[in-house]
Image: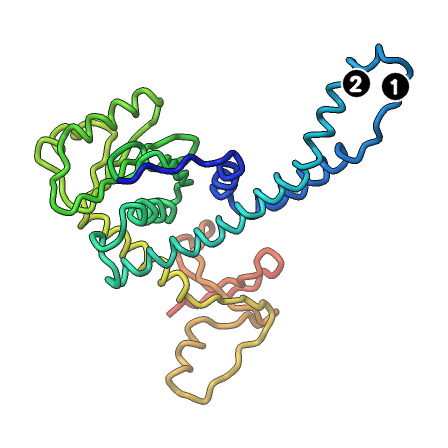
Protein backbone atom coordinates (compact mmCIF):
# COMPACT_ATOMS: atom_id res chain seq x y z
CA UNK A 1 0.00 0.00 0.00
CA UNK A 2 1.42 3.41 -0.99
CA UNK A 3 2.23 5.88 1.75
CA UNK A 4 -0.39 8.56 2.08
CA UNK A 5 0.74 12.08 1.15
CA UNK A 6 0.88 14.46 4.07
CA UNK A 7 -1.97 16.93 3.86
CA UNK A 8 -1.88 20.67 4.43
CA UNK A 9 -3.93 22.25 7.24
CA UNK A 10 -6.29 23.62 4.57
CA UNK A 11 -6.94 20.08 3.27
CA UNK A 12 -7.38 18.79 6.82
CA UNK A 13 -10.00 21.49 7.43
CA UNK A 14 -11.84 20.46 4.25
CA UNK A 15 -11.86 16.82 5.40
CA UNK A 16 -13.17 17.87 8.80
CA UNK A 17 -15.93 19.97 7.23
CA UNK A 18 -16.89 17.07 4.95
CA UNK A 19 -17.73 14.99 8.02
CA UNK A 20 -20.45 17.47 8.98
CA UNK A 21 -23.86 17.80 7.29
CA UNK A 22 -23.89 20.51 4.64
CA UNK A 23 -26.69 22.36 6.41
CA UNK A 24 -24.35 22.81 9.39
CA UNK A 25 -21.22 23.68 7.41
CA UNK A 26 -22.70 26.38 5.18
CA UNK A 27 -24.04 28.55 8.06
CA UNK A 28 -20.66 28.13 9.79
CA UNK A 29 -18.96 29.42 6.63
CA UNK A 30 -21.17 32.50 6.61
CA UNK A 31 -20.62 33.18 10.31
CA UNK A 32 -16.85 32.71 9.93
CA UNK A 33 -16.69 35.14 7.02
CA UNK A 34 -18.74 37.85 8.75
CA UNK A 35 -16.70 37.65 11.95
CA UNK A 36 -13.28 37.49 10.30
CA UNK A 37 -14.21 40.24 7.86
CA UNK A 38 -15.24 42.52 10.71
CA UNK A 39 -11.91 41.87 12.43
CA UNK A 40 -9.84 42.35 9.26
CA UNK A 41 -11.54 45.64 8.35
CA UNK A 42 -11.58 47.11 11.86
CA UNK A 43 -9.73 50.46 12.02
CA UNK A 44 -6.13 50.49 13.15
CA UNK A 45 -5.65 52.25 16.49
CA UNK A 46 -3.65 55.47 16.54
CA UNK A 47 -0.57 55.22 18.72
CA UNK A 48 -0.03 58.34 20.82
CA UNK A 49 3.45 57.19 21.83
CA UNK A 50 5.73 54.21 21.09
CA UNK A 51 5.11 52.73 24.55
CA UNK A 52 1.62 51.70 23.48
CA UNK A 53 2.95 49.51 20.67
CA UNK A 54 3.33 46.40 22.82
CA UNK A 55 -0.25 46.61 24.12
CA UNK A 56 -1.62 46.97 20.57
CA UNK A 57 0.53 44.22 19.05
CA UNK A 58 -1.92 41.29 19.68
CA UNK A 59 -4.77 43.16 17.99
CA UNK A 60 -2.58 44.03 15.02
CA UNK A 61 -1.53 40.39 14.65
CA UNK A 62 -5.16 39.23 14.83
CA UNK A 63 -6.14 41.66 12.07
CA UNK A 64 -3.21 40.47 9.96
CA UNK A 65 -4.28 36.83 10.32
CA UNK A 66 -7.95 37.62 9.74
CA UNK A 67 -7.22 39.25 6.37
CA UNK A 68 -6.45 35.97 4.53
CA UNK A 69 -8.50 33.80 6.89
CA UNK A 70 -11.72 35.62 6.02
CA UNK A 71 -11.52 33.94 2.61
CA UNK A 72 -9.63 30.72 3.33
CA UNK A 73 -11.75 29.44 6.23
CA UNK A 74 -15.17 29.97 4.56
CA UNK A 75 -13.79 28.52 1.31
CA UNK A 76 -12.67 25.36 3.13
CA UNK A 77 -16.06 25.03 4.81
CA UNK A 78 -17.95 25.48 1.53
CA UNK A 79 -15.73 22.95 -0.26
CA UNK A 80 -16.28 20.56 2.65
CA UNK A 81 -20.03 21.02 2.40
CA UNK A 82 -19.94 20.23 -1.32
CA UNK A 83 -17.80 17.16 -0.60
CA UNK A 84 -20.32 16.08 2.05
CA UNK A 85 -23.19 16.28 -0.46
CA UNK A 86 -21.35 14.35 -3.16
CA UNK A 87 -20.10 11.84 -0.60
CA UNK A 88 -23.66 11.19 0.50
CA UNK A 89 -24.73 10.65 -3.12
CA UNK A 90 -21.79 8.31 -3.67
CA UNK A 91 -22.63 6.24 -0.58
CA UNK A 92 -26.27 5.87 -1.64
CA UNK A 93 -25.27 4.81 -5.14
CA UNK A 94 -22.78 2.29 -3.75
CA UNK A 95 -25.35 0.93 -1.29
CA UNK A 96 -27.96 0.44 -4.01
CA UNK A 97 -25.45 -1.19 -6.38
CA UNK A 98 -24.59 -3.84 -3.80
CA UNK A 99 -28.23 -4.32 -2.80
CA UNK A 100 -29.16 -5.04 -6.43
CA UNK A 101 -26.11 -7.28 -7.02
CA UNK A 102 -24.68 -4.82 -9.55
CA UNK A 103 -21.55 -4.91 -7.37
CA UNK A 104 -20.38 -7.43 -4.79
CA UNK A 105 -18.49 -7.00 -1.53
CA UNK A 106 -15.42 -8.48 -3.22
CA UNK A 107 -15.53 -6.30 -6.34
CA UNK A 108 -15.42 -2.92 -4.56
CA UNK A 109 -12.31 -1.33 -3.07
CA UNK A 110 -11.48 -1.43 0.65
CA UNK A 111 -12.38 2.28 0.95
CA UNK A 112 -15.74 1.71 -0.74
CA UNK A 113 -16.28 -1.23 1.61
CA UNK A 114 -15.87 1.11 4.60
CA UNK A 115 -18.28 3.63 3.02
CA UNK A 116 -20.79 0.82 2.42
CA UNK A 117 -20.62 -0.38 6.03
CA UNK A 118 -21.01 3.18 7.28
CA UNK A 119 -24.10 3.70 5.12
CA UNK A 120 -25.60 0.42 6.39
CA UNK A 121 -25.23 1.56 10.01
CA UNK A 122 -26.45 5.06 9.14
CA UNK A 123 -29.69 3.54 7.87
CA UNK A 124 -30.07 1.74 11.19
CA UNK A 125 -30.23 5.05 13.02
CA UNK A 126 -26.57 5.53 13.97
CA UNK A 127 -24.61 8.74 13.52
CA UNK A 128 -21.50 7.65 11.62
CA UNK A 129 -18.06 9.25 11.85
CA UNK A 130 -15.54 8.04 9.27
CA UNK A 131 -12.21 8.27 11.03
CA UNK A 132 -9.95 7.52 8.08
CA UNK A 133 -7.51 5.79 10.45
CA UNK A 134 -7.92 2.30 9.09
CA UNK A 135 -6.76 1.91 5.54
CA UNK A 136 -6.43 -1.50 3.98
CA UNK A 137 -4.58 -3.05 6.90
CA UNK A 138 -6.25 -2.16 10.18
CA UNK A 139 -7.38 0.45 12.69
CA UNK A 140 -10.75 1.79 13.80
CA UNK A 141 -12.62 2.70 10.63
CA UNK A 142 -15.93 4.01 11.95
CA UNK A 143 -17.23 5.52 15.17
CA UNK A 144 -20.97 5.10 15.72
CA UNK A 145 -23.05 7.28 18.03
CA UNK A 146 -26.57 6.44 19.19
CA UNK A 147 -28.53 7.46 22.30
CA UNK A 148 -25.40 9.06 23.77
CA UNK A 149 -23.37 5.84 23.50
CA UNK A 150 -20.27 5.19 21.37
CA UNK A 151 -19.59 2.07 19.31
CA UNK A 152 -16.43 1.23 17.36
CA UNK A 153 -16.33 -0.51 13.99
CA UNK A 154 -13.47 -2.24 12.24
CA UNK A 155 -13.87 -3.29 8.60
CA UNK A 156 -11.94 -6.07 6.89
CA UNK A 157 -12.30 -6.72 3.19
CA UNK A 158 -10.23 -9.89 3.03
CA UNK A 159 -11.20 -11.84 -0.06
CA UNK A 160 -9.56 -15.20 0.65
CA UNK A 161 -8.33 -15.11 4.24
CA UNK A 162 -10.43 -15.95 7.29
CA UNK A 163 -10.41 -13.20 9.92
CA UNK A 164 -8.49 -14.44 12.93
CA UNK A 165 -9.22 -14.00 16.63
CA UNK A 166 -6.42 -11.43 17.08
CA UNK A 167 -8.41 -8.88 15.06
CA UNK A 168 -11.41 -9.29 17.34
CA UNK A 169 -9.22 -9.22 20.45
CA UNK A 170 -7.55 -5.98 19.37
CA UNK A 171 -10.89 -4.24 18.84
CA UNK A 172 -12.08 -5.41 22.25
CA UNK A 173 -9.00 -3.82 23.82
CA UNK A 174 -9.59 -0.52 22.00
CA UNK A 175 -13.24 -0.57 23.14
CA UNK A 176 -12.10 -0.76 26.76
CA UNK A 177 -9.51 2.00 26.27
CA UNK A 178 -11.99 4.32 24.51
CA UNK A 179 -14.89 3.61 26.87
CA UNK A 180 -17.08 2.40 24.02
CA UNK A 181 -20.30 0.59 24.88
CA UNK A 182 -19.91 -1.93 22.07
CA UNK A 183 -18.17 -2.78 18.86
CA UNK A 184 -18.58 -4.41 15.46
CA UNK A 185 -16.15 -6.25 13.24
CA UNK A 186 -17.53 -6.33 9.71
CA UNK A 187 -15.87 -8.48 7.07
CA UNK A 188 -16.52 -9.39 3.46
CA UNK A 189 -15.70 -13.03 4.16
CA UNK A 190 -15.87 -15.16 7.30
CA UNK A 191 -14.44 -15.46 10.82
CA UNK A 192 -12.57 -18.38 12.31
CA UNK A 193 -14.26 -20.42 15.03
CA UNK A 194 -11.79 -19.01 17.58
CA UNK A 195 -12.85 -15.47 16.70
CA UNK A 196 -16.52 -16.37 17.15
CA UNK A 197 -15.83 -18.07 20.46
CA UNK A 198 -13.93 -15.01 21.78
CA UNK A 199 -16.81 -12.65 20.91
CA UNK A 200 -19.41 -14.70 22.77
CA UNK A 201 -20.65 -13.06 25.96
CA UNK A 202 -19.16 -9.70 25.05
CA UNK A 203 -20.84 -6.59 23.65
CA UNK A 204 -19.05 -7.29 20.40
CA UNK A 205 -20.85 -8.31 17.24
CA UNK A 206 -19.20 -10.12 14.34
CA UNK A 207 -20.83 -9.52 10.95
CA UNK A 208 -19.78 -11.76 8.07
CA UNK A 209 -20.22 -10.97 4.40
CA UNK A 210 -23.46 -12.94 4.02
CA UNK A 211 -25.00 -11.14 7.03
CA UNK A 212 -23.91 -7.76 5.68
CA UNK A 213 -25.54 -8.53 2.33
CA UNK A 214 -28.77 -9.48 4.10
CA UNK A 215 -28.68 -6.31 6.20
CA UNK A 216 -28.20 -4.17 3.07
CA UNK A 217 -31.04 -5.82 1.15
CA UNK A 218 -33.43 -5.69 4.10
CA UNK A 219 -32.68 -2.01 4.66
CA UNK A 220 -33.30 -1.22 0.99
CA UNK A 221 -36.53 -3.25 0.96
CA UNK A 222 -37.76 -1.47 4.09
CA UNK A 223 -37.04 1.93 2.54
CA UNK A 224 -38.82 0.89 -0.68
CA UNK A 225 -41.92 -0.21 1.23
CA UNK A 226 -41.94 3.03 3.19
CA UNK A 227 -41.69 5.10 0.02
CA UNK A 228 -44.39 3.08 -1.76
CA UNK A 229 -47.01 3.61 0.94
CA UNK A 230 -49.53 6.22 -0.24
CA UNK A 231 -49.94 9.29 1.86
CA UNK A 232 -53.57 9.70 2.90
CA UNK A 233 -54.99 13.04 3.90
CA UNK A 234 -58.08 12.90 6.08
CA UNK A 235 -60.69 15.50 5.24
CA UNK A 236 -63.29 15.64 8.00
CA UNK A 237 -66.75 16.81 7.12
CA UNK A 238 -66.23 15.81 3.46
CA UNK A 239 -69.01 13.58 2.23
CA UNK A 240 -67.94 10.27 0.73
CA UNK A 241 -68.70 9.98 -2.96
CA UNK A 242 -71.18 7.26 -3.87
CA UNK A 243 -69.92 4.69 -6.37
CA UNK A 244 -72.24 2.96 -8.81
CA UNK A 245 -70.12 -0.18 -8.57
CA UNK A 246 -72.06 -2.67 -6.41
CA UNK A 247 -68.78 -4.13 -5.11
CA UNK A 248 -67.94 -0.81 -3.46
CA UNK A 249 -71.25 -0.40 -1.68
CA UNK A 250 -70.55 -2.83 1.17
CA UNK A 251 -67.35 -0.94 2.03
CA UNK A 252 -69.32 2.28 2.37
CA UNK A 253 -71.92 0.55 4.51
CA UNK A 254 -69.21 -1.00 6.68
CA UNK A 255 -68.00 2.46 7.77
CA UNK A 256 -70.98 4.81 7.78
CA UNK A 257 -70.82 8.58 7.84
CA UNK A 258 -72.03 10.57 10.79
CA UNK A 259 -75.63 11.73 10.10
CA UNK A 260 -74.90 14.96 11.97
CA UNK A 261 -71.54 16.20 10.58
CA UNK A 262 -70.83 13.73 7.74
CA UNK A 263 -67.48 12.72 9.26
CA UNK A 264 -66.61 8.99 9.11
CA UNK A 265 -67.73 6.93 12.09
CA UNK A 266 -65.42 4.53 13.93
CA UNK A 267 -65.97 1.39 15.98
CA UNK A 268 -66.02 1.89 19.73
CA UNK A 269 -66.70 -0.32 22.77
CA UNK A 270 -69.00 0.80 25.59
CA UNK A 271 -67.09 1.09 28.87
CA UNK A 272 -70.00 1.78 31.20
CA UNK A 273 -73.76 1.50 31.45
CA UNK A 274 -76.01 -1.41 30.59
CA UNK A 275 -74.30 -1.90 27.19
CA UNK A 276 -70.80 -2.24 28.64
CA UNK A 277 -68.60 -4.38 26.40
CA UNK A 278 -70.86 -3.97 23.36
CA UNK A 279 -69.65 -2.37 20.14
CA UNK A 280 -71.24 0.67 18.55
CA UNK A 281 -70.52 3.32 15.93
CA UNK A 282 -69.23 6.66 17.22
CA UNK A 283 -68.38 9.84 15.37
CA UNK A 284 -64.64 10.26 14.73
CA UNK A 285 -64.96 13.95 15.69
CA UNK A 286 -65.77 13.12 19.33
CA UNK A 287 -65.95 15.09 21.64
CA UNK A 288 -66.93 17.84 19.17
CA UNK A 289 -69.67 15.59 17.85
CA UNK A 290 -71.27 12.96 20.14
CA UNK A 291 -73.48 11.24 17.59
CA UNK A 292 -73.62 7.43 17.92
CA UNK A 293 -75.33 4.53 16.19
CA UNK A 294 -76.30 1.67 18.46
CA UNK A 295 -76.36 -1.16 15.94
CA UNK A 296 -73.45 -3.61 16.02
CA UNK A 297 -70.74 -2.87 13.39
CA UNK A 298 -70.60 -5.49 10.67
Depth order, front residue of 100/220: 100
Q: Quadrant of residue 190?
A: top left
Q: What label sits on residue 56 in the rendered view?
A: 2
Tell me if I can see residue 205 in this picture. Answer: yes
Q: How many residues crowd mark 2 within 10 Å: few (<14), some (14–19), many (20+)?
A: some
Q: Find numbered disc 1 in the image and state the secondary structure of the residue it sits on.
A: loop
* Residue 31 horizontal side relative to residue 277, left or right: right
Q: CA distance from mark 2 to mark 1?
A: 9 Å
Q: Quadrant of residue 43?
A: top right
Q: How many residues crowd mark 1 within 10 Å: few (<14), some (14–19), many (20+)?
A: few
- Upstream in the sequence, badge 2 or badge 1? 1
Task: Give how far across and how far down residue 9 sits, in percent.
Answer: 52, 34
Depth order, front residue of 13/99: 13
Does 5 appear above or below 48?
Answer: below
**Residue drawn where x is 39% and y is 44% of the image:** 125
Tell me if I can see residue 274 in this picture. Answer: no
Q: What label sits on residue 47 in the rendered view?
A: 1
Q: Are marks 2 and 1 in contact (CB under 8 Å)?
A: yes
Q: What label sits on residue 83 in the rendered view?
A: none
Q: Find numbered disc 2 in the image and state the secondary structure of the residue it sits on.
A: helix
Does 222 appear above or below 80?
Answer: below
Task: Give how far across and how far down residue 187 sits, in percent.
Answer: 21, 43
**Residue drawn where x is 16% and y is 46% of the image:** 189
Task: Give how far across and how far down residue 288 sits, in percent.
Answer: 62, 58
Identify the residue at the far bottom of this view: 244
Amino acid sequence: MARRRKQTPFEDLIDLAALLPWWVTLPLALIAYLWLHSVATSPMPTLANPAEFNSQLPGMMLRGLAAPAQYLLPAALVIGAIASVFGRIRRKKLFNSVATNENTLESISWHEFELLVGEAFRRKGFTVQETGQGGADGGIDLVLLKDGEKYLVQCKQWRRQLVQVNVVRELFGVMAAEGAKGGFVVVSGRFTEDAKAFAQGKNLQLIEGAELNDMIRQSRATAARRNSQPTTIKTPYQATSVSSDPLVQPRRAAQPSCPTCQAPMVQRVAKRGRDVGNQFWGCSQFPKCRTTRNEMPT
